[in-house]
Image (cartoon, rainbow, N blue to C red):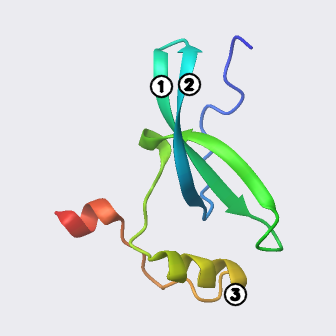
């Protein structure tokens, strides 16, 4: 495919980084990508995406809090989210 299907989406989804992989043969040579599991209506069903680290926003939530967000259907999302980058600075 000569063009990218999604240039700018502007939407976010809660997901869990499960591992990283090296993609060989991309236009940039080798590229490190994160495997991100995005659960759907049942926690054991969902989608896996390969996403560049530059495109990931890391909220300051623990894994436990992230699972609570998924299981509660979003009812347990804090009113204000901060990113891990903001917490370090």
Relative vertical location of residue 27 with respect to residue 18 in this rendering, above or below: above
State yes or no: discs 3 and 1 in contact (Cβ < 8 Å).
no
| Closer to us: 4 or 46 | 46
Q: Is residue 19 visible?
A: yes
Contact between labelled residues 1 and 2, with CB atoms less than 8 Å apart: yes
User: At 63% across and 61% down in the image, what residue appears?
Assistant: 13
Q: At numbered mark 1, what does the secondary structure look like: helix, strand or loop?
A: strand
Q: Earlier in the sequence, mark 3 or mark 1?
A: 1
| 24 shown above or below 13 | above
Q: Which residue is mark 2?
A: 23
Q: Quadrant of residue 42?
A: bottom right
Residue density around tag 2, few if under 14, some if 14–19, many if 20 or more, within 10 Å: few
Residue under pointer 3: 72
Q: For label 3, count other residues whose C-alpha is less than 10 Å away and answer few (under 14), some (14-19) or many (20+).
A: few
Residue at 54% in and 49% down: 19
Q: Name the element at disc 3.
A: loop
Pick the front one: 56 or 80: 56
Q: Position of residue 85 (x, y in %)?
A: 28, 59
Q: Residue shown at 16%/63% (left/top)?
A: 89
Label 2 and label 3: CA atoms lie apart by 35 Å
Q: State the mark number for residue 31.
A: 1
Q: Earlier in the sequence, mark 2 or mark 3?
A: 2
How far apart, in angstroms, are the residues tagged by discs 2 and 1?
A: 5 Å
In the figure, is residue 20 to the left or right of 59?
Answer: right
């Amino acid at each position: 495919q000569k063009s990218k299907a999604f240039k700018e989406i502007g939407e976010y989804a809660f997901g869990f980084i499960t591992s990283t992989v090296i993609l060989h043969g991309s236009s940039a040579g080798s590229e490190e990508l994160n495997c991100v599991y995005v659960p759907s209506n049942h926690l054991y069903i969902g989608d896996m995406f390969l996403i560049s680290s530059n495109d990931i926003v890391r909220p300051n939530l623990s894994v436990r809090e992230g699972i609570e967000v998924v299981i509660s259907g979003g009812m347990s999302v804090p009113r204000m989210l901060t990113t891990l980058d903001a917490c370090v600075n």
